Image: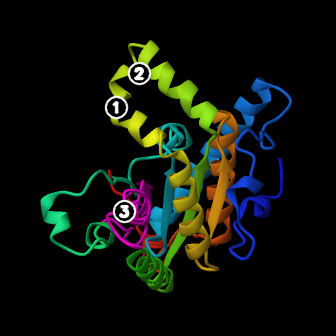
Amino acid sequence: MANLDQYRVNPKSFSLKDFNARDKTERSATKEEDAIEFTRLVAEINRYQDILHAEGKRKVLLILQGMDTSGKDGTIRHVFSECDPLGIRLANFKAPSCEELAHDYLWRVHQQVPKAGELVIFNRSHYEDVGIVKVHKWIDEEECKRRYAQINDFERMLTETGTTIIKCFLHISKGEQKKRLQERLDDPTKTWKFNPGDLAERKLWENYTEAYEQAIKATSSKQAPWYIVPADSKTNRNLLISRLLLNTLKNLDLHYPAVPAEYKSIKIED
């Protein structure tokens, strides 16, 4: 297990090429050890999330972003497998609806941010609005730069009003994406996930890499940092994100609400 800070983006010297998507540093010597450690991590996440919900003061937002097949769904399914649904919410961001397009691009996102005592996971996010829209040239460079600044302001507002933000970019290699797309075609239980449009997007791999690099570099701030998660290994990905989340929850210094003094004298009658 490595120092988690090594995955944190330094915007002054960031390049995705400096991060190896195949890295397995978070893994142990055996699959059995990995399974035991992961079970411990998800149990601890559940424990701290229960306190977060009971305390009802702080808010946590986990943002998962990445190329197609990078494992956003799998991360959610595994990392939160032991969590009580109370106090946890998932927000998926697909192509915007007509109603959403009639508003500013952050309108639909702001509606989904966590309330007090809540942990919210974004499966994709407002970074689609400086990602796919940039790659397909639906916005120009000047508008993209304005959006970087607006996103920084938006996230600063969230953190200043009690939200802790963890932003994870699930970093996979082009070769691993090819393997996962082929698995979707070959496995009848996964074919429903396959979208022929993914093949067209795959041809724009370098464009997406550049767009993500620029967005991450422009928006990795002290209050809302980005972490690059090597994700070719699903186990490595799950262990790392679990550790990042658990470390964040521990640092919040969460406590169950104090028991009111008058409750101590209450006796439940038969």
Quarter-wise, where is residue 70 in the image?
Answer: top right
Look at the numbered disc 2 and give the secondary structure of its residue. loop
Q: Which of disc 2 and disc 3 is earlier in sequence?
A: 3
Residue at the image position 50 percent from the left and 38 percent from the top = 81
Residue at the image position 78 percent from the left and 37 percent from the top = 27
Amino acid at pointer 1:
Asn
Question: Which residue extends farthest right?
Answer: 29
Question: Is the residue marked by circle 1 packed among few (<14), some (14-19), or many (20+) residues within 10 Å?
Answer: few
**What segment is highlighted magenta in the picture?**
112-140
Look at the numbered disc 3 and give the secondary structure of its residue. loop
What separation in Å lies between label 3 and label 1 (alpha carbons)? 22 Å
Q: Position of residue 203 (x, y in %)?
A: 47, 40
| Nearer mark to the viewer, of 3 and 2 | 3
Residue 54, placed above or below residue 28: below
Q: Which of disc 1 and disc 3 is earlier in sequence?
A: 3
Q: Position of residue 219 (x, y in %)?
A: 55, 74
Quarter-wise, where is residue 236 in the image?
Answer: top right
Q: In front: 60, or 86?
A: 60
Q: State left or right for residue 92 relative to residue 257.
A: left
Amino acid at pointer 2:
Lys
Question: Is the residue marked by circle 2 packed among few (<14), some (14-19), or many (20+) residues within 10 Å?
Answer: some
The answer to if 127 sits in the magenta stretch is yes
Instruction: Report the residue marked by disc 2.
Output: 190
Amino acid at pointer 3:
Lys
Instruction: Report the residue marked by disc 1.
Output: 195
Q: In front: 80, or 48?
A: 80
What separation in Å lies between label 3 and label 2 (alpha carbons)? 31 Å
Coloring scheme of the render? rainbow
Instruction: Report the residue marked by disc 3.
Output: 137
